[in-house]
Image (spheres, helix red, strand yellow):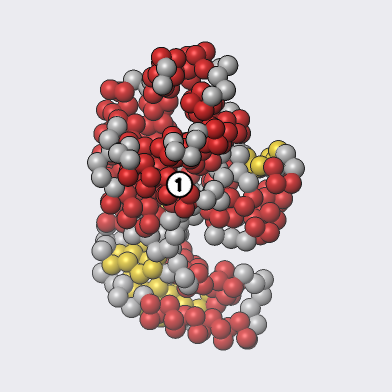
Amino acid sequence: MDSLINAAAGALSRGDPLAALKLVALRDDAPGLALRGIAMSQLGELARARVLLRSAAHAFGPSELVFRARCVVAEAEVALASRELGWPVRRLEAAGVTLERHGDVLNAAHARYVVVRRLLLIGQLQAAQRMLADLPAAPSPALRLTHELIVAHLAMRRLRPTVARAALARASRIALRAGIPALTAEVGTALNQLEAPAARLITRHEERTLRLREVETLLRSDALVIDGLRHAVQRGEVRIPLAARPVLLSLARTLALAWPGDATREQLATQAFRLRHADETVRARLRVEIGRLRRALQPVADISATPRGFALAPRDARRVLVLARPVDEQHADVLALLSDGEAWSTSSLALALGAGQRTVQRTLDALARAGKVRSSGRGRACRWASGPLPGITTLLLLPAGLPTN
């Protein structure tokens, strides 16, 4: 490669896309197109960046496998940034194998980290954790920082702020040594999320917000916690997952909010089954579900019948608490995804949420009527975005593959 290409590549590695563009703005050869595409992506012109990178991949000859594979990795990262989550992952994985086979360890590792970040974005936390654990040591400061940020985000979504804080401390030191403003800003954003209100603690008489470290302390205490963040009932080390049984979780929450008193049958039925009135059929169903909940909670609590309804009786716990999401919003998971500042397609939202595209479209239409989201473009080019949710940690509103640990 010539001196201009080398100089532009150096400018991009330092996070200076404008300097790189000054050197290659008029270049239409394959290396020039690739560097222009990377520069445009760093400037936020993602659509133009994808066009340039795709053109560069075609411009490289059939024998230039490494350069073509690098273009594929760069295009995949741009697709991730522009929330095109349906981008073919197998193509990226094949590019990573090609790069590793030809000794390009840095870009091969980069390809794997793009895959991990995509898994994290669509809520596949366990798959992301497994793949991250199998990765070798990151060969560059930027990838080491990416590694630590992924570790931190996984820990925050699993309610482990101590692990997240340690990872962010390491990331901060890496960013400081690298001297790249974009990396420093990304670490700062993650630190703000760690310190923002992450949940609501609800009892019979009060409601207050908690930070992640307070949530961690609460879950380690001897209180019986109805955990609405991870859809479980927990006391100390004993955790009873109810993610697949939302009716039981709703009943447990209603009983917990009534503790130490009882909850009426009317309250339990209307909350659990979302009905305005409870007839005999609903009451019969309620008795069945209470029996199931009693069996599920046997290690940590009992449920007794009262003249009015049912009461929760915790075992070896002095308090019964409800842990809820930081905002009581019907479509909080959609808003959390859109609050990252990027424009999402309906298909990518559906993939991240694990829902049907038509269902997601109806949700977006409802949020648009309420003025909470906005769209741009039409048809396949339509994209959706919203402003950030102020003052809360949106990580715990994001969808996650179940079960989470």
Reading the image, the residue beneath label 1 is 92
Residue 187: image x %, image y %? 37, 32
**Mark 1, residues whose alpha carbon is within 10 Å: few (<14), some, or many (≥20)?**
many
Quick one: quadrant of the C terminus?
bottom left
With respect to residue 369, does 307 lie above or below?
A: below
Q: Is residue 221 left or right of residue 269?
A: left
Which of these two is toward me, 205 or 268?
268
Question: What secondary structure is marked by label 1?
Answer: helix
Residue 14: image x %, image y %? 38, 20
- Would residue 340 be visible to someone looking at this image? no
Looking at the rendered structure, the kind of residue marked 1 is Leu
Residue 238: image x %, image y %? 28, 67
Q: Quadrant of residue 297?
A: bottom left
Q: Is residue 281 left or right of residue 242?
A: right
Q: Residue at x 44, y 38 (%)?
A: 63
Q: Is residue 98 left or right of residue 276?
A: left
Q: Residue at x 43, y 69 (%)?
A: 242
Quick one: quadrant of the N terminus?
top left
Residue 324: image x %, image y %? 46, 55
Q: Residue at x 57, y 69 (%)?
A: 271
Total numbered badges shown on the rendered structure: 1
With respect to residue 323, does 95 lie above or below?
A: above
Q: Residue at x 68, y 59 (%)?
A: 358
- Would residue 23 be visible to someone looking at this image? yes
